Image (spheres, grey):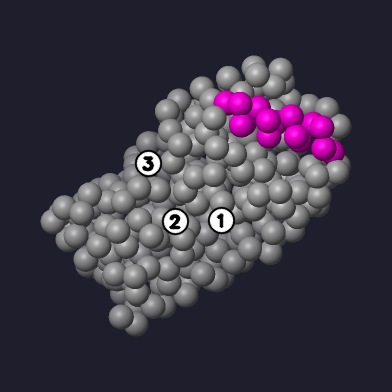
Amino acid sequence: MRILHIDTGKEMRGGQHQVLLLLEALRDAQVQGTLLARNRSPLFYAALNRGFAVLPATFNAMWTESRRAGTLVHAHDARGHTLAAFMSRAPLVVSRRVAFPGSGSPASHWKYGRAKRCLAVSNHVARQLILSGVPQDKIDVVYDAVGQIPPLATRPSEGPLVALATADPQKGRDLVERAAHVARTPVVFSEDLLADLPKASAFVYISRSEGLGSAALLAMSLGVPVIASEVGGLPEIVIHQETGLLTSNDENAIAHAIRRIAAEPELAESMRRAAYARVAAEFSQSRLVERTLACYRRALES
């Protein structure tokens, strides 16, 4: 089996990090792969630096590479899906990460009709695909993963809140800022979560729409207590008062959750330990590649 991946994202966001994780896991499983990425994009260079075969994502590359024997095409974003739907000569599987239904237009039905299987990043996203007209029996839920999980470290007794630095209005930075002000707690909007999370007292992930929340998974894998919006796929990974705190998207409710982390250290400690164990069991790279390969086999058999 040879997998031709395509992701045309301009930035290095959660989806692009997941593409790299999958490429690494498949390589470890001895599955050959080539990536088509936007030329000169962060993903293009990141994959190249890690030794993967990478080509610019063009119509010609899709046409040529998909004609090789034993190839299956995996489209990881909407634009890549469109390009593959038109130009792929091989069976197609499509990942869907966003938390809203498709347009339901004839063009959308045609695109999804071209796919043998759809990989939904959560059960919530799977339901949105069904609402868009994708048959349930064509959908596989394949959760995001985290990379190598380090040993559980001691949580800092004091430290700032950490939230994701983003200009995306759906990510709720404005709500985090107002909640931190209400709770009188400093917050760091991080552009490098791997560097900033180990110093954090908690990770606050507020979103108005969310397919799953790979940044929350990362925080959980590092033993950082998580406060997350009760939207989209986030409740599938953050179990309220067990692996984190869920909150409505209200600044006072978020501030209350922030105060609980500081005021109830035993709760914070038990949640972070349970979250760490859950990520190791359910969201590892080995689980990612196991579920993805099962989807690939179904696509090739259909």
**Callout 3 amino acid:** Gly
Mark in front: 3 vs 1: 1
**Amino acid type shown at disc 2:** His
**Residue 198 in sight from this viewpoint:** yes
Q: Nearer the viewer, residue 267 or 29?
A: 267
Instruction: Please report the residue visible at 39 percent of the width from the left and 48 percent of the height from the top.
Output: 98
Q: What's the distance in space between the residues labelled 2 and 3, CA to CA?
A: 23 Å
Across the whole image, how many numbered discs are drawn on residues? Answer: 3
Q: Is residue 264 magenta?
A: yes
- Measured in 3D between alpha carbons, the distance from the residue under mark 3 to the one under mark 1, in whole angstroms, is 26 Å
* Left or right of residue 201, residue 117 in this image: left
- Mostly what secondary structure, the magenta segment? helix
Q: Going from the N terminus, do you reach mark 3 or mark 1 first? A: 3
- Circle 1/circle 2 CB separation < 8 Å: yes
Q: Which quadrant of the view contains residue 300?
A: bottom left
Name the residue carrying label 3: 9
Residue wearing tag 1: 236
What residue is disc 2 on?
A: 124
Q: Quadrant of residue 164?
A: top right
Q: Foreground: 234 or 88?
A: 234
